Image: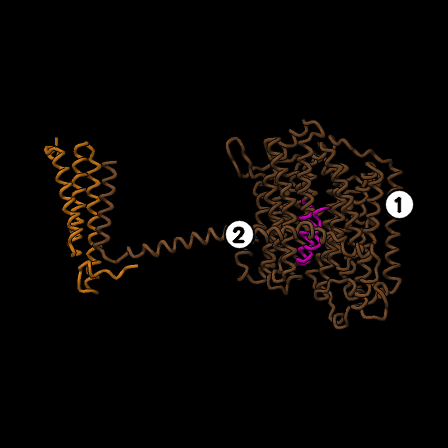
Amino acid sequence: MINVTLLLIPALPLLGFIILGLGYRSIPKKLASLIGPGTILISFILSLVTLFSFRLSPFAFRFFDWISLGPVSIPFEFLIDPLSILMMLIITGVGFLIHVYSIGYMSHDKGFNRFFAYMNLFIFFMLILVMSANYAVMFIGWEGVGLCSYLLIGFWFKNQQFNNAAKKAFIMNRIGDLGFLLGMFLIFTTFRSFSYQAVFALAKTMSPGSETMVAITLLLFVGAVGKSAQIPLYTWLPDAMAGPTPVSALIHAATMVTAGVYMVARSGVLYVLAPVTMEVMGITALATMLLAATIAIFQNDIKKVLAYSTISQLGYMFLALSVGAFTGAMFHLMTHAFFKALLFLGAGSVIHALEGEQDIRKMGGLKNALPKTYWTFLVGTLAIAGLPPLSGFFSKDEILGNVFGSSLPLWVVAVGVSMMTAFYMFRLLFLTFAGKNRGSDPQSLKIHESPSVMTIPLFILAILAFFGGFLNIPEIMGGSGMLKEFLAPVFADAVRLNQLQPHHVAARLEWSNMVVVLLLVLLMVYVAYRRFVKREPETVFGEAKMSTQMNIEIGANNRNFFIRLIENKFYVDEVYDYLFVRPALRISDALHKFIEERFIDRIVNGTGTLVVRFSNGIRYLQSGHVGMYLFFMILGILLILFINIFL
Amino acid sequence: MNTLTTIPINHYLIFCSMLFSIGVIGVLIKRNALVILMSVELMINSVNLLLAAFSAYSNDPAGQIFVFFIMVVAAAEVAIGLAIFVLIYKTTHSIDIDVLNKLKW
């Protein structure tokens, strides 16, 4: 029975994809908006059933042998343990809410059915990724979500810029996937198996810090860097905002980009045996969160701010992993899924209301026009800034606590990023909702609150973002750490083997840290308030009397060098373009001109010409005289006889 | 000992080769499509006879059963061939194969 349930959880979204994908021309929108979210809802209910029927011991279900070659056998199997159940609930739960929201957001779009087909396919692959019991099956999901991400970023494929963004995301992910694949191969040659349970059981007996282990974990981490948008492969994520906003919420905030974090947490046993990798991961995470937070402060596109914020928050999760705080990372993954999905959907609601406007310099004063969006967005902002008692406070506090116990400099930077997070999020909130409207006049007349099919998911996510933290209240506050206990069996081995175990921080110090961080965050909120609400928002971008468009242009020229550097995202895209894209294009061009045109084309065309000329000569043999054909036939028979008898 | 094997195998071989050669020559030198078809039948029957003879000499009845199949298939072929000739005759009023030279190049 449980077997069927497990199979149905990913199979239903796949069924939805098949129905919507095959019948996308003929299925009416009403039916599609029933099938799309409906399959996910049933999967969510089945995931809840799995949660409640789960009896503490992880079990693997083997459905069939996928690859069997001699002694090697790679089964298609699912592993059900607290970690995969948590991920299943996040994916189907948040996924369902975003599907419902999409009914409203995509209602005017011609590709309505296609959209839901892709979204269902994405949920299917994501579930395969988290439910798999071995790296090979995980790789199916890993590649599948990359494909869906590509399809959905380039959803409006008539815009060439969007297509380029989709290609960029796909290619950068490919670089990471190569690392993941090599890591998988190395796992197989070392452990002779892909199955988690077999690999981890063998790994536990190996000596920590061995070169193989470092190589495996580093290669897997390259995969995580690509999928989870860390330095140096992060530039695809801001561009990925070209897709529809629900896609950004589901794929590029809540689920797919956290696949890297999930994978590292899942392979925790391998990572704790490779301290070098942990260090590399910590440095990468720190650099990423700092860089992304800096860029986010100066972005003016509502979705780009959230995209850089996502990169920064993913950095938090990797930082937590790098000090061995696996539960902290998964906890933040969960709360981040709630509040970042909420923020993206809120941003989508704003964009929907303003008919496609994404520039926050042209927004402002939307508080009264969009009250529901405003209040839910406020909850999301408070949560991501880490104000108690919202979810972000607890998850960030857990990570900061663990980082503090591991290294003080890391903690200082992490707190700094936390302050920057509060600043850029409140900047976004104030510029969008507070003050007066800076948009052109006809635009402000048409503003309308989104339909309830969009606001209800916002409310539910706001409730989750508000109370999600109570799942794991730290012990010093008298909480039981429910999530920690739930996940403990999964990470027991990894925590036991961890060489760099963060030492326990005294309760008093923990309290004072918490208060210090909170005060600093509040200070940044106040600074943002002073800068973007107290001073008339018009003056933020230059002279008050000028039109907004002129302000923007003058504002761009009057900044000093550093601000211009950050506004242009440190020119990383341009550097990549110069170092990798253009040389690749130039080499392709040269190969085309010399190898392709001079050699390959000539060989191919020459073969064709030769055949034509030859046939021109001998086609006269087909004369139409039956007697002649018969003569040749007999000649042939005689020849065969002759060869058989005398040779 | 059955009646087939009362005649030495060499006789069969020589007789069938002659029959086959007559068929080949008929196909090559005749212009009438009907006669060519008859010559082809001659070739088929010479092979059939040889098959039956070999089958009898090696005490394996399978070969003789095969002959029946070949005869059935050959009859079907002849039926199709004659039908084609009838149609050709209806359009060209001739079954001389030298007239049928429109299908070329």
Task: Tell me: A608 left or right of A19.
Answer: left
Q: Nearer the viewer, mark 2 or mark 1?
A: 2
Q: Is residue A145 magenta?
A: no
Q: Amino acid at mark 1?
A: Val
x%, y% of residue A305? 76, 55
Label 2: state its secondary structure. helix
Kindly report the distance in space between the C-alpha atoms of the residues bearing marks 2 and 1.
65 Å
**Chain letter for the orange colouring in the rendering:** B
Task: Tell me: A645 left or right of A505.
Answer: left
By secondary structure, the bulk of the magenta-drawn segment is best described as helix
The magenta stretch is: A231-259
Whether residue A468 is situated above or below residue B97 in the rendered picture? above
Q: Earlier in the sequence, mark 2 or mark 1?
A: 1
Q: What residue does disc 2 label? A: A596
Depth order, front residue of A497/A242: A242
In this view of the protein, can residue A365 be seen by the observer?
no
**Chain letter for the brown colouring in the rendering:** A
Depth order, front residue of A54/A173: A173
Label 2: chain? A
Label 1: state its secondary structure. helix
Q: What residue does disc 1 label? A: A516
Q: Is residue A253 magenta?
A: yes
